[in-house]
Amino acid sequence: MKHIECCGERTLKDENRITLGPNTYEVDREWLKWPEELPAYTVLNATWASDGLFYAVTGKKEYPVVVFDKDGNYIKTIAAGEFTKTHAIFETKRHTFLITDSRSHVVKEIDPEGNCLRTWGTWNVPSDTGYDTEAWAKMEPLGLKPIETKWNHNPASNAKFQSVVRRGEPFNTPCAMIQAEDGEYFAADGYGNCAVHIFDKDGNLIKSWGEPGSEYGQFRVVHSVLLDKYNRLWVSDRENGRVQCFTRDGELLAVADGNLSRIGNCTADDKYLYIGELDGGITIIDLDTLECAGQAGAPKTFMRTHGICMDTEGNLYTCSNNWNPTNITKFKKVN
């Protein structure tokens, strides 16, 4: 098992220009133009689709998926009424989208017009993992305290995530789902589970793996999954502040940790894995050497990254789950 130590300097020296390894980016915080009729500016994740459009999931049931053009202009809202809280989005080879609903415990596949094609999971029925959103309210009167983590000092939040005591079936508050080139699906499940689920190309469950905890191979909030060019599966282990790399069957290959905050999401090109950090920053891992190649950003800055994606020109886009009108930041690659 390869240990990838991330130990870069965590300061933001220039809000207009950042460097990640050999790459330099100009920062554009005004790229996305929200229409006046959409009052809240949260985006949890987004993707550039094969039709050249930018699809963003907001977590809002009234406008769960919002579509923009290449210049950041609003086009339309789709799938209204289909979701309670959209959390992540992935485009399949069929130009459909896999969207997780982290409140209703399902994953849906929709077409570009927002029509539901299929559903995984049972609406509003979570699997049995022990997950308890009221865990802190029950612990506090007894003088009990959850384990405080490096980046999360909220006892209610820590108690909730640490209430997961066993792996459950799909799903309990799922976070993301992707599809491999051969048609298999991989799901990150999630806030209320500790599992990676694998489905065959027809959508049938093949296997699940994972368990709660902080040891290597264990998870505390399985927040995202990504397959790289070598067909390795990178799993964001959010509350443990790390990304773990596995074979598609669940064999642990590498762990990236160290000076990382909670992990929001990851994206990749042919050279690097780009790790978006929820508390502020981006870290890149060289996919050939499995070494940390650069870090940028710092906590409590605009680089708070819940979601991250890339366009065909190598520009990065980060999504913040803070409510603000510039919560999508474009990092335009200049070299």
Image (spheres, rainbow, N blue to C red):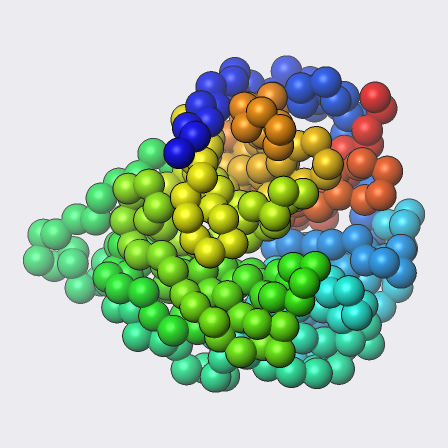
Residue at 61%, 55% in the rendered image: 44
Residue at 55%, 34% in the rendered image: 280
Residue at 77%, 25% in the rendered image: 25
- The location of residue 12, given as percent across then percent down, is 60, 20
- 321, above or below 55, in the image: above
Say whether residue 79 is left or right of residue 2: right
The outermost residue toward the left is 142
Q: Closer to the camera, 285 or 238?
A: 285
- The location of residue 167, given as percent across then percent down, is 32, 65
What number of labels is visible? 0
Residue at 81%, 58% in the rendered image: 49
Please identify the quarter of the rendering in which residue 55 is found. Answer: bottom right
- 315, above or below 308, in the image: above
- The location of residue 239, given as percent across then percent down, is 39, 45
Q: Closer to the camera, 300 or 267?
A: 267
Say whether residue 19 is left or right of residue 32: left
Q: Closer to the camera, 329 or 194?
A: 194
- The location of residue 248, given as percent across then percent down, is 51, 54
- 187, above or below 125, in the image: above
Quarter containing the C terminus:
top right
Quarter containing the N terminus:
top left
